[in-house]
Image (tube, grey):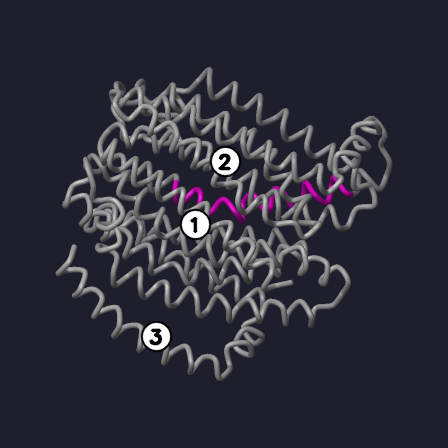
């Protein structure tokens, strides 16, 4: 089950990221790294900020354990779905009415003219949030049935929508292209919802959802208890999952005070960094979370710990080799992917430096994601939230300390350093003794030897790339 779910999520993520890189290559070539690309990334970041805090991580980590536990599954699902969707639609309308204020919040360093230019794009992109919430809830139901393929592959539909917009409008002025990209985001969101509806029909969830709607006015003690458990764990999960998103928010705000293009350097560097994180850490944790939740609910902690140990060694090999490769070849990777059209040599150097700083945090971010499952599956969301706050405070200290000497790269490094804080406290909650018992293995020696060999190979590859690139 572990291998099957991991490869399903990983392959789906890879397909999606390939389309994502095609999208980014086209964006870099057509828009470059300038005020218009900064404006779009600000507008696109705003719904993504709320999506990752509310709709994805926090929601899934609270919904699945609560769903497994409740005896009123259909009614519980309908209650949560209707409540969240109504809130997000109203919130999107508020963002539309006050779009300039919201644009100013996320890009505080923009002048009034740039904020006014950004406002309509912020409003358009925000309507992606209600769509992706539907996708997240539908995906959680499918995860319960160990159906991961649609959720894993569907993100490609978002990228396809944006690629289509870029190709259709590449000859237009940059403002029009940003409008097209924004509407391409909404088209991609609609396609994702449709794909999940087909999967739900195949898994016979339509009758399940209809049953929840039919008895929507019914209330009993079991349902109220389920709602209370979900609400309590959800808000703690929001705090726990908001740390990297708040960090991203702060980075964008601080980068808006730096030279033009800094927001874009952070975006492109982070996009490359997110590939191994999503391909390995997120894919694996998504696959095993429902199983770990079931085992802990059944008081089978030893089996859950063994499953976590298997996941650790898979990630240990994949993340360490990816970190070394991404750090050593950071500038060459950026040059190969993005140095076309409007993306200059200087843009490549700046983005490469940012990427190298991001890669330092790949291992701690990935492992913290894995071991936090133990807390979320055990309904210890409050503990995870406190740990996340420690990491956030550390990040803010590092960001303000490093932004002046290092610029955008300092913000990336601050995020990586805070990841080590996050990992330390997560492992302490999991149990440092249990962690070192997992680490004490012959696999550690094999991993060290592998990294030494990789280091030599990568330096040889770097020299070759300098000759031919």
Which of the 4 image quadrants contains residue 108? top left
Q: Which residues are magenta?
A: 226-248
Residue at point 13% right, 61% down?
467
Taking the magenta stretch, the answer to whether it contains residue 232 is yes
As helix, strand or loop, the secondary structure at mark 2 comes to helix
Mark positioned earlier in the residue sequence (1 or 2):
2
Please indicate whether residue 416 sits to the left or right of residue 444 in the image. left
Residue 65, how many percent across, how many down?
A: 70, 51
Mark pair 1, 3: CA separation: 31 Å
**Front-most of 83 and 282?**
282
**Front-most of 111 and 369?**
369
| Mark 1 Cα-neighbour bin, 10 Å: few <14, some 14–19, many ≥20 | many
Q: Please tell me the numbered disc located at residue 50.
A: 2
- The residue singled out by tag 3 in the image is 451
As helix, strand or loop, the secondary structure at mark 1 comes to helix
| Mark 3 Cα-neighbour bin, 10 Å: few <14, some 14–19, many ≥20 | some
- Where, quadrant-wise, is the C terminus in this rendering? bottom left
Residue 94, how many percent across, how many down?
A: 51, 19
């Amino acid at each position: 089950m572990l291998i099957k779910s991991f490869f399903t999520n990983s392959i789906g993520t890879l397909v999606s990221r390939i389309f994502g890189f095609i999208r980014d290559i086209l964006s870099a070539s057509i828009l470059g790294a300038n005020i218009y690309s900064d404006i779009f990334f600000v507008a696109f970041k705003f719904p993504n900020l709320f999506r990752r805090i509310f709709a994805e991580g926090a929601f899934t980590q609270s919904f699945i354990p609560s769903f497994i536990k409740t005896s009123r599954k259909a009614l519980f699902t309908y209650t949560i779905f209707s409540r969240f969707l109504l809130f997000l639609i109203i919130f999107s309308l508020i963002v539309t009415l006050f779009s300039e204020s919201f644009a100013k919040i996320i890009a505080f360093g923009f002048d009034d003219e740039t904020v006014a230019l950004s406002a309509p794009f912020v409003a358009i992109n925000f309507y992606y949030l209600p769509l992706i919430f539907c996708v997240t809830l539908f995906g959680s139901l499918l995860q319960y049935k160990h159906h991961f393929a649609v959720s894993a592959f569907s993100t490609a539909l978002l990228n396809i929508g944006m690629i289509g917009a870029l190709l259709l409008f590449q000859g237009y002025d940059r403002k029009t292209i940003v409008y097209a990209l924004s509407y391409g985001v909404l088209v991609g969101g609609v396609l994702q919802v449709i794909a999940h509806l087909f999967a739900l029909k195949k898994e016979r969830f339509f009758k399940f959802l209809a049953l929840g709607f039919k008895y929507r006015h019914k209330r009993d003690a079991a349902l109220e208890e389920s709602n209370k458990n979900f609400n309590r764990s959800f808000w703690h999960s929001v705090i726990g999952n908001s740390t990297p998103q708040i960090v991203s928010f702060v980075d964008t705000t601080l980068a808006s005070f730096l030279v033009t293009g800094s927001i874009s350097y952070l975006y492109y560097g982070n996009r490359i960094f997110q590939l191994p994180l999503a391909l390995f850490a997120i894919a694996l944790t998504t696959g095993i979370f429902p199983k770990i939740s079931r085992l802990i609910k059944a008081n089978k902690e030893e089996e859950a710990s063994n499953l976590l140990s298997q996941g650790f060694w898979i990630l240990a090999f994949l993340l360490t080799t990816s970190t070394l490769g991404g750090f050593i070849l950071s500038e060459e990777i950026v040059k190969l992917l993005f140095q076309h059209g409007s993306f200059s040599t200087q843009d490549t150097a700046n983005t490469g430096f940012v990427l190298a700083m991001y890669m330092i945090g790949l291992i701690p971010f990935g492992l913290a994601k894995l071991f936090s499952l133990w807390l979320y599956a055990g309904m210890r969301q409050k503990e995870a939230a406190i740990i996340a706050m420690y990491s956030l405070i550390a990040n803010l200290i590092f960001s303000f300390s490093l932004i002046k000497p290092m610029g955008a790269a300092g913000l990336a490094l601050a995020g990586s350093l805070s990841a080590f804080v996050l990992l330390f406290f997560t492992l302490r909650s999991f149990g440092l003794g249990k962690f070192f018992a997992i680490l004490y293995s012959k696999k550690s020696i094999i991993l060290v030897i592998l990294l030494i060999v990789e280091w030599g190979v990568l330096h040889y590859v770097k020299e070759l790339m300098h000759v031919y690139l």
